[in-house]
Image: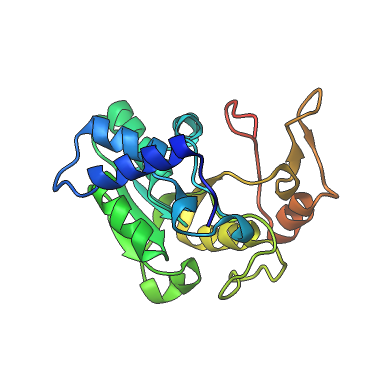
């Protein structure tokens, strides 16, 4: 478990108290998303897993479309929450969102924060057994790097967890939007004068072998 500052611990405790309510207001949900700390009870850092920051999630949502969406490694649902509200406002109707998360404590929190989604407590590597059908888009902020996993993607056999998730997503959805390290993408965007392809990076080799087209988002420098 991570050591929180006194201020972080206080806000986390307030978020836990809010989650005891039967129904949360929008202000309650905002507070929990921004202050319920994954490191308070679980050690995620060594597993390359971190919750998506509030502002990044809503920037991310600009790149998302479609009506039927699956969130892989959903955590407590920050990405899904942002995408749900962005698409509902944009399209005039609520999207259908399915959240897959293996940590039951995160699923319990997520159900309070985004009850509109279908929450499934399962490992993403069980995707075939779940028989979920086809989606317009997959979204994910997956664990990064060579972290423990229970299986492999359908065709990728390398070591990077995020590439396994993208490989799985390709079997479930027509398009995908992901938060991944720059070296795991097939292009350079951060810290360079202009966007350029990086065929020799881990992401470049992955995309070429899998036949994927990877492009940068609308302006998130990550």
Image side of residue 171 versus residue 30, left or right: right
Q: Quadrant of residue 83?
A: top left
Q: Residue at x 56, y 60 (%)?
A: 165
Q: Is residue 114 visible?
A: no
Question: Up-down: is 148 above or below 73?
Answer: below
User: Percent x, y for residue 112?
Assistant: 24, 49
Quadrant occupied by the C terminus: top right
User: Percent x, y for residue 86?
Assistant: 35, 31
Q: Residue at x 76, y 29 (%)?
A: 195
Image side of residue 219 versus residue 211, left or right: left
Question: Up-down: is 153 above or below 108?
Answer: below
Tell which of 199 and 76 is nearer to you: 76
Tell which of 105 and 215 is nearer to you: 105
User: Percent x, y for residue 115?
Assistant: 23, 49
Q: Which residue sits furthest front?
A: 6
User: Percent x, y for residue 150?
Assistant: 56, 75
Q: Which residue sits furthest top?
A: 193
Question: Up-down: is 186 above or below 142?
Answer: above
Image side of residue 64 versus residue 220, left or right: left
Tell which of 29 and 198 is nearer to you: 29
């Amino acid at each position: 478990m991570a050591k929180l500052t006194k201020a972080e611990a206080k806000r986390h405790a307030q978020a836990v108290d809010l989650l005891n309510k039967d129904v949360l207001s929008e202000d309650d949900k905002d507070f929990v998303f921004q202050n319920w700390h994954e490191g308070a009870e679980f050690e995620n850092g060594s597993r390359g897993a971190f919750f998506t920051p509030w502002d990044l999630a809503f920037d991310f949502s600009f790149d998302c479309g479609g009506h039927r969406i699956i969130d892989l490694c959903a955590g407590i649902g920050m990405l899904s929450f942002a995408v749900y509200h962005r698409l509902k406002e944009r399209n005039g109707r609520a999207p259908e969102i399915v959240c897959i998360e293996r940590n039951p404590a995160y699923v319990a929190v997520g159900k309070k924060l985004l009850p509109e989604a279908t929450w499934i407590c399962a490992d993403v590597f069980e995707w075939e057994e779940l028989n979920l059908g086809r989606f317009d888009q997959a979204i994910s902020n997956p664990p990064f790097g060579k972290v423990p996993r229970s299986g492999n993607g359908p065709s990728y056999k390398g070591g990077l967890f995020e590439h396994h998730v993208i490989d799985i997503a390709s079997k479930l959805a027509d398009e995908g939007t992901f938060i991944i390290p720059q070296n795991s993408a097939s292009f350079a965007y951060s810290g360079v004068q202009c966007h350029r392809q990086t065929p020799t990076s881990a992401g470049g080799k992955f995309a070429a072998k899998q036949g994927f087209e990877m492009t940068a988002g609308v302006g998130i420098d990550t």
